[in-house]
Image (spheres, rainbow, N blue to C red):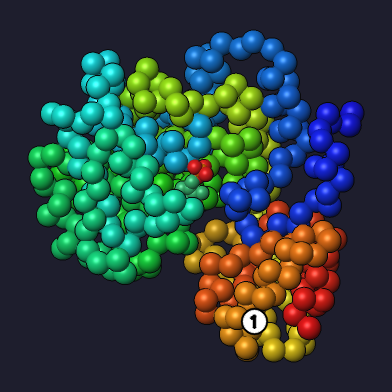
Amino acid sequence: MTKPLLPPALLSRSPLLNAAGTFTPVGVSRSSPAVAEAAAWALQRYLVIDELQDLASRELADFSGAAAGTVVHCAAAGITLGVAAAMAGSDPARIAQLPDAEGLRRVVVVPAPHLIDYGHPLATDVRLAGATVQACGRPERCTGDELLPALAAPEVACLLLVSSRLTRDPAFDFPAACEAARAAGVPVLIDGAAQDLRVRELMAQQPAALVLSAQKYLAAPTAGLVVGEAGFIDAVRAQHKGIGRAMKASKEAIVGVLAALAERRGLDLPSWGARQAQKAQQAVDALRGLRGVEVTLVPDPLGAPFPRVRLRFADGANEARRVAQALKRQDPPVWVMEHAVHEGVLTLELVALRADEVDAVVDALRRCAA
Ligand SMILES: *Cc1c(COP(=O)(O)O)cnc(C)c1O
């Protein structure tokens, strides 16, 4: 590849080592050369976007088992456009009216434990369409008895469910909630942004639409994937004549997604999973014996096919915080998951790293935790 035309300050920097997972503040993922080439190919020609989206719909259907799909700017945009589709359908006058929701079904029912903050509040995605959020249950728990009556109100546009390790109610009955919404004639929208490895499992709940991030484990350019019922996906696409203009996918994103889907089709998931487990074990073995740190392998709470490495610091939150900051000042800088730092815990997600990079992360930790 020719040297990119970029400021020297950017080119001279050591590439960051990301053990923080598909984390937006560090650029989420690294695309393969094939995906990068596909995006570059698209950037150098004109393409008919509607034809690209038709093609993407067929490929996304093949990937997910849904009837149809479409590519939007990102998963957050997909949630907003899914809510807009539930409110306005494909009706041009209603689409033009949004985000003014006067006279439309505008209430989005969400279990309170699903109102997560993944960098901004999920509720903001809903409110951007002109809808209002009705939270059900308490922040840590939502039962069927709390959810079901809410679905019966006439102004309900859809039920929004989130499949994420950030949700706070592990006992929440997903299938029962989807079933009840179907019985009430309420479309279900699932935010499964980081769950592309579990796409078929989530589609088995038969939502009107499931939203995914293409830039997370698929490692495509930034894009949101909305897959689901054909009529509902048509309505999502139709929003581009309204609020969706500000949330459209670029041609390079759509083409990059097509390449990433082709790569995923060729992936042998069991041996991929075995490689992930091997890297995690490599880190656990190398970090065992680090003074004041308890090192354990933890499975993904939702059943994604890879484990993470948990580091529990005997000296607590301040020590964990100090180590996380010191890691970022290393050369190369190392980023780790800090969601549980207040409990004295740092977590390593190694999916994005090669084995030699796992060694480099381990070395940095040995330097910083000493
Ligand atoms: C990452 C994430 C999002 C946002 O995805 P973007 O593609 O960055 O908009 C939304 N919901 C959940 C659960 C996420 O993990």
Direction right: furthest residue: 2
Residue 175 figure quarter: bottom left
Please name the residue that numbered disc 1 is placed on: 319
Q: Residue at x 11, y 47 (%)?
A: 152
Above or below for 253 versus 305: above
Secondary structure of the residue carrying tag 1 is helix
Residue 188 figure quarter: top left
Pick whichever, 117 or 71, lies toward us: 117
Q: Is residue 10 left or right of residue 217?
A: right
Q: Residue at x 83, y 43 (%)?
A: 9
Residue 162: horizontal and vertical position, in percent? 38, 52
Pick whichever, 63 or 38, lies toward us: 38
Disc 1 marks which amino acid? Glu
Whether residue 291 is visible, yes or no, is yes
Residue 110: horizontal and vertical position, in percent? 27, 52
Pick whichever, 288 or 6, lies toward us: 6
Mark 1: C-beta under 8 Å from nearest atom of ligand 1: no
Quadrant the N terminus occupies: top right
Residue 52: horizontal and vertical position, in percent? 55, 18
Q: Residue at x 36, y 45 (%)?
A: 124
Residue 357: horizontal and vertical position, in percent? 81, 60
Quadrant the C terminus occupies: bottom right
Above or below for 256 versus 24: above
Whether residue 307 is visible, yes or no, is no
Q: Residues within 10 Å of mark 1 (few under 14, many from 20)?
A: some
What is the total number of numbered labels drawn onto the structure image? 1
Q: Residue at x 20, y 31 (%)?
A: 101
